[in-house]
Structure formats: structure tokens, C-alpha cells
Image (cartoon, helix red, strand yellow):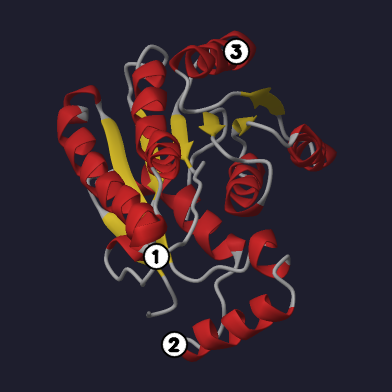
């Protein structure tokens, strides 16, 4: 299948590690020039840039808090100045903190909604200035938790439910500009965060594998391959969809 992505430009938020980093690398391998967005981990972001440049790709790391309109606007201005346009936006940046509902604070509520919901709204606003007349693709990284939430995740799961709805609204609203908007909802995926949990992470991993029909944890490459497809012309008739990437869970 010819994905026809050579010469495209993408902004991937939260791309310094994990799923975001893998998405950025996968797009670059298809000939996409990529803005590697990060908020605090510049070292990891530059490592992603270096890995892309190592095999001849184009990438630039740009610091921006996606919950800040001014910083998001500046990030897209850099993307346009550096690469001349924006064709693809991947809203991957996200935060979470699991806790019983009685322990939820106003501060944590606003932190999660600001990054997970307001962030994609602000990036979409900024990107619209730079999409070419031929349109483009916006891919929002959701979660299986919006459809199958677990205990102690009321705020996080609510943000991902909001993101699902946002994607459907934007798919309708931006269709006349030939901009497609879809959600990718990963299931249990092996990232640095799980590995950092040590023994507890090993126990959680075993439970997640047991609950997954395909019998393994998802890998960041599993998510990145679906995102790359959605960004391409091969998915030109797909918009407003929520695609689960969960191993059957």
C-alpha cells in the first residue's frame, strides 16, 4: 500500500517518549517532516530528533505547553517557518492521575482537562492557519478508558470521553476544508511509565495480558502504524471514526 506521505509535515504533541515518540518516528520513516513537541523533557525530545535524523529524516523539537494558547500558536508558527505548512496534527499529549473520586481535587481536574481536552482544541485552532487547500488529517489519541472505564479514573476517563466527542464534532465542522479528524483509542500499551513501576508494573502487566484476547501487551509500534495509516491518503474516506487498537479487549 502506498501511503503517499512523502513531503507532508506533521506536528506531534507529547512526542518526547512513549506512543508520541513512536508515532513521530513512524511518520518520519514515511517521508514526513515532524515537529517533536514536548513540555519539560528536552533531552528525550532531542533524542527522538536525533534518531529521526540518523536515517535521513527531518525533525525539530519545539517546547510548548499545549494548554497555553500563546505557546501553541508559537509552535505552529515555528512549524510553518521551518517546513512551510502543516498537513498532519497528532494530539498525543496527555496526563492522568488515578484516584478515588473523594480524592479528586479542583487542581487535578483542571490539569487533566486543560491538557487532554483544551490542548487538542488549541492545537486545532492554531493548525487551521497552516493547512493547505488540499486539507489534511487530525488524529486524536484517546483511550479504551472512554468506553470501558475502570475505578479511580473518573477524571481521566471523562477527558477521553470528551475527546471522542470533540473528534466527531470537528470531523463534521472541518469536512468542508477537507480536513479529516479521527480518534485512535489504545488499549493496554507497554510504555516507559509502566516499566518504571517495577514489581507493581509487572503485576499490572500480567493482569492486562490476561484480559487481552490476543494475549500480549500492545506496543507503541502497534499504535503508530494505525496513526500513520490515518494520516495518509489511504485513509482518505475515513473521518469522524474512533478506532480501537486494543488486541481485542
Front residue of 240/112: it is 112
Q: Residue at x 59, y 23 (%)?
A: 64
Please give the count of numbered marks on the rendered protein. Answer: 3
Q: Position of residue 88 (x, y in %)?
A: 45, 32
Does residue 202 appear to the left or right of 7 in the view shown? right
Does residue 191 appear to the left or right of 198 in the view shown? left
Q: Write down the quadrant of residue 33 in the picture.
A: top right
Front residue of 238/182: it is 182
Front residue of 153/164: it is 153
Going by the picture, which residue comes out furthest to the front? 102
Q: Earlier in the sequence, mark 2 or mark 3?
A: 3
What is the secondary structure assignment of the residue under circle 2?
Answer: loop
Other-residue count near label 3 (Cα within 10 Å), few / some / many at <14 / 14–19 / ≥20: some
Front residue of 126/85: it is 126
Point out which mark residue 218 bears: none
Other-residue count near label 2 (Cα within 10 Å), few / some / many at <14 / 14–19 / ≥20: some
Q: CA distance from mark 2 to mark 1?
A: 23 Å
Question: Which residue bears the numbered disc 3?
Answer: 78
Question: Which residue bears the numbered disc 1?
Answer: 100
Question: Which residue bears the numbered disc 2?
Answer: 211
| In the depicted structure, whether residue 216 falls above or below residue 43 | below
Amino acid at each position: 500500500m502506498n501511503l503517499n506521505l512523502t513531503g507532508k509535515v506533521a506536528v506531534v504533541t507529547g512526542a518526547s517518549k512513549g506512543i508520541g515518540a513512536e508515532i513521530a518516528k513512524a511518520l518520519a520513516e514515511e517521508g514526513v517532516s515532524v515537529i517533536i513537541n514536548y513540555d519539560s523533557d528536552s533531552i528525550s525530545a532531542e533524542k527522538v530528533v536525533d534518531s529521526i535524523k540518523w536515517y535521513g529524516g527531518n525533525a525539530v523539537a519545539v517546547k510548548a505547553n499545549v494548554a497555553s494558547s500563546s505557546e501553541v500558536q508559537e509552535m505552529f508558527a515555528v512549524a510553518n517557518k521551518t517546513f512551510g505548512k502543516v498537513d498532519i496534527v497528532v494530539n498525543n499529549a496527555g496526563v492522568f492521575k488515578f484516584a478515588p473520586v473523594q480524592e479528586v481535587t479542583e487542581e487535578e481536574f483542571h490539569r487533566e482537562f486543560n491538557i487532554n481536552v483544551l490542548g487538542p482544541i488549541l492545537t486545532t485552532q492554531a493548525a487551521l492557519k497552516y493547512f493547505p487547500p488540499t486539507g489534511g488529517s487530525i488524529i486524536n489519541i484517546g483511550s479504551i478508558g472512554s468506553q470501558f472505564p475502570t475505578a479511580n479514573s473518573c477524571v481521566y476517563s471523562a477527558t477521553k470521553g470528551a475527546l471522542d466527542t470533540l473528534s466527531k464534532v470537528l470531523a463534521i465542522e472541518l469536512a468542508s476544508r477537507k480536513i479529516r479528524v479521527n480518534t485512535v483509542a489504545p488499549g493496554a500499551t507497554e510504555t516507559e511509565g509502566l516499566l518504571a513501576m517495577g514489581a507493581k508494573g509487572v503485576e499490572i502487566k500480567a493482569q492486562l495480558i490476561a484480559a487481552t484476547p490476543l494475549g500480549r501487551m500492545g506496543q507503541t509500534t502497534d499504535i503508530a502504524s494505525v496513526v500513520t495509516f490515518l494520516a495518509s491518503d489511504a485513509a482518505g474516506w475515513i473521518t469522524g471514526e474512533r478506532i480501537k487498537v486494543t488486541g481485542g479487549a
